Amino acid sequence: MNIEKATQEVIDRNQHPKLAAAAIQQHGGLTEDNFKYPSDYMSCEAGVHGFIYFNETSEFYDKNKNLIVSMVEDYEEEMGEELDIPCYLKWETQHKNHVAWLVWEVLAYEIHSYAHEMNYAE
């Protein structure tokens, strides 16, 4: 498996390629394990590198806020309703964390689909 090629294909297929590339960079890049065992990387609650600590997710959100807002708006338009994203008015860090996790988990689903389509997943 060519990791660079697979990573680029995941980015190119993504509806928001700049955000996908930013999430992959935040994760430290994709590895063979991301494609062989994609289910292991689907939930940030389980601990996904780059999306574990509030300082990581807050920084990711701050750097990519416009791209994230665009992604959320597109998904809401596609679904015909607003996403149920908690807005923690007192705890802005919690909101940033929640939305950063959403970005990764949407991407992880796409990696999962790609890995199975290409028969990389075990």
Image: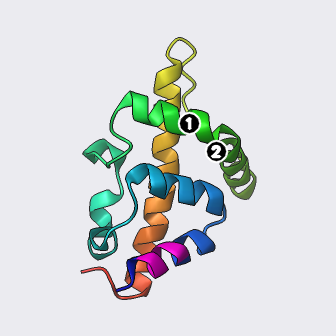
> On the image, which quarter does residue 14 sit in?
bottom right
| Residue drawn where x is 45% and y is 43% of the image | 101
Please, is residue 110 above or below residue 22 in the view?
Answer: below
Q: Position of residue 76 (x, y in %)?
A: 70, 49
| Residue drawn where x is 49% and y is 68% of the image | 110
The residue carrying mark 2 is 68
Q: Earlier in the sequence, mark 1 or mark 2?
A: 1
Q: Is residue 88 visible?
A: yes
Q: Is residue 84 visible?
A: no
- Looking at the rendered structure, the secondary structure element under dot 2 is helix
Q: Give the amino acid type for the residue marked by disc 2 in the picture.
A: Ile
Is the residue marked by circle 2 packed among few (<14), some (14-19), or many (20+) residues within 10 Å? Answer: many
Most distant residue in the top direction: 90
Queried whether the magenta region covers residue 7, the answer comes back as yes
Q: Quadrant of the N terminus?
A: bottom left
Left or right? Give the position of 36 relative to 6: left
Image marks 1 and 2: residues in contact by CB distance under 8 Å: yes
Q: Give the amino acid type for the residue marked by disc 1 in the picture.
A: Tyr
- Magenta region: which residues? 4-8
> On the image, which quarter does residue 120 sit in?
bottom left
| Residue drawn where x is 32% and y is 48% of the image | 49
